[in-house]
Image (tube, grey):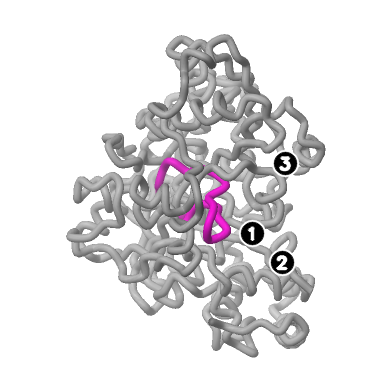
Amino acid sequence: MNKKIFSAVACTAIVASLFSACGNTGSSGSGSGTVSNDAPAQSEADNSATALSGGVYKSIQDLDTESLKGKTITLYTHGGNRVLGEEKKDENGNTYRDESYAYLKHLAEQFEKDYGIHVDLQVNSTEDDIRPLLQTADPGIDIYTSPNWTVEEWQQYAEPYALLSELTPLYGDYAATMYNDGTYVYALMPAKTYNNAVVYNEETIKSVGYDSIPTTQAEFENLCQALRDAGIDPIAMHRVENWPLSTMRDFANYVAGSNDAFPSMLKSDTPFSESHPMGKTIRMYTDWKSRGFFEADTYTDFGVAMDVVGNGKAGMMLFGAWVVPQIQGRCPEGTDPSVIKFAPAPDFGKGQYVMAAAADSYFISKGSDDKEAARLFIEYISESPQYLADSGYIAMKKGVTPVVPELYKIIDDAVEAGTCKVLYNYATDDNSINNEAVLSEANLLADEKYAGNLFDSLDVTKDPDWSAYDAQVDKQNKAYVEAREDLGVSWK
């Protein structure tokens, strides 16, 4: 049974400050003294890629731009705010779209002026909206940005964008964190940013006596309790859906002090017990739930969850840098958006860390009739540092001078001071693929069930009773080991 599954985290993103501090825009950050030793290693597949005949990657200079004039390409994106503008509320509480934030729309208009190619932008709310088009190789879809698919789906739907070996000179070790199968990169991710940390409202935490996010777990939990005592939701999650629980993958790395907490489940017979970083992290989140640190009333959608951080009814979210500009755009009229800040997660016992990975993915559909025009627009994006900065990311292509958004300053300063260390997102390899295959075989991967089943087993409407949680831990541990044995995989 071949179930090689790799589900990339939606907004995997890469370290920004690290490179702005040392002036390096295209390599893996040697010489600054602040980078963790966990940079992704080159795999055998990476090395074998150079032996393949013919390259795949094309730069702007490699494309016949004159012959592409007059074409129209269609881009489907789940990032509707960059097409329609940020959702805001007027003085009467009515929601409207501020088109000054429609950065992708503005970029597409400039691209048309520069190259004579029109980009038709379409917003899709979920991957399921466009899957039928991709399955039939519909020529009406040229580029798409939806993440979270398996390797098999990338191979089926996406035109290989480049050999991994071709992108490594341009993007350094970050190329290995782009969506790839070890040989081919299927989506160009031209930017970098920090992954999940603490996005918070500075005014809100100041209202309960804190000027910044604490650096230790105990003090962080004291802050959460102070917010709860003041009638403020400490952490907005949006628990209607399971995907927000995927932040636990990064937080487990902070608990472990390494970048492999999730794939290293493959080593353990008890990955959901507190003896393993993943199990310990899920238990920590669930403990926070029992103490009222997440929303008391479930938010109806993720937009509302962002709204309450913007208006101060909640203190923070545990997400990546990508959410910061969206919340800043949701601050009430008259509020300085800079009150929304981004800080490292606290030290859970191994030190303070922040995850780094490539960000902002663009796939070319296999069914596209205009693949060259699609490539041209994606390459145009990679060389548009202001657009990437406006989107909450940092351009990282070699030769492109990055624009660093102010939102990174707190983490940048901590990284530069050496108080916060950087971990690279774990590169796709057999261990990461096989771990997700085991979780899938155990019916625990889809919809983040490996975390959701445990998180939901604790009934907070009653006095905390962890017996149901502990029983679920045992159940999932047994299911995981059985699935691993059925598939015949092990840690390599």
**Which residue is depicted at the point 72% across and 43% down?**
127
Tell me which label, 1 or 3, sits earlier in the chain: 1
Q: Amino acid at mark 3?
A: Thr
Percent across and percent down for residue 40 are 41, 65
For label 2, the crowd category at 10 Å Cα-Cα, with few meaning under 14, some 14 to 19 and many 20 or more, is some
Q: Amino acid at mark 1?
A: Ser
> Which residue, given by chain and number where applicable, does mark 3 sit on?
126
Residues at marks 3 and 2, CA–CA distance in whole angstroms: 18 Å
Residues at marks 1 and 2, CA–CA distance in whole angstroms: 9 Å
Secondary element at tag 2: loop
Magenta segment, which residues? 177-196
> In the image, which disc is placed on residue 7?
1
> In the image, which disc is placed on residue 49?
none
Relative to 72, does residue 392 appear above or below in the rendering? below
Percent across and percent down for residue 110 are 45, 15
For label 3, the crowd category at 10 Å Cα-Cα, with few meaning under 14, some 14 to 19 and many 20 or more, is few
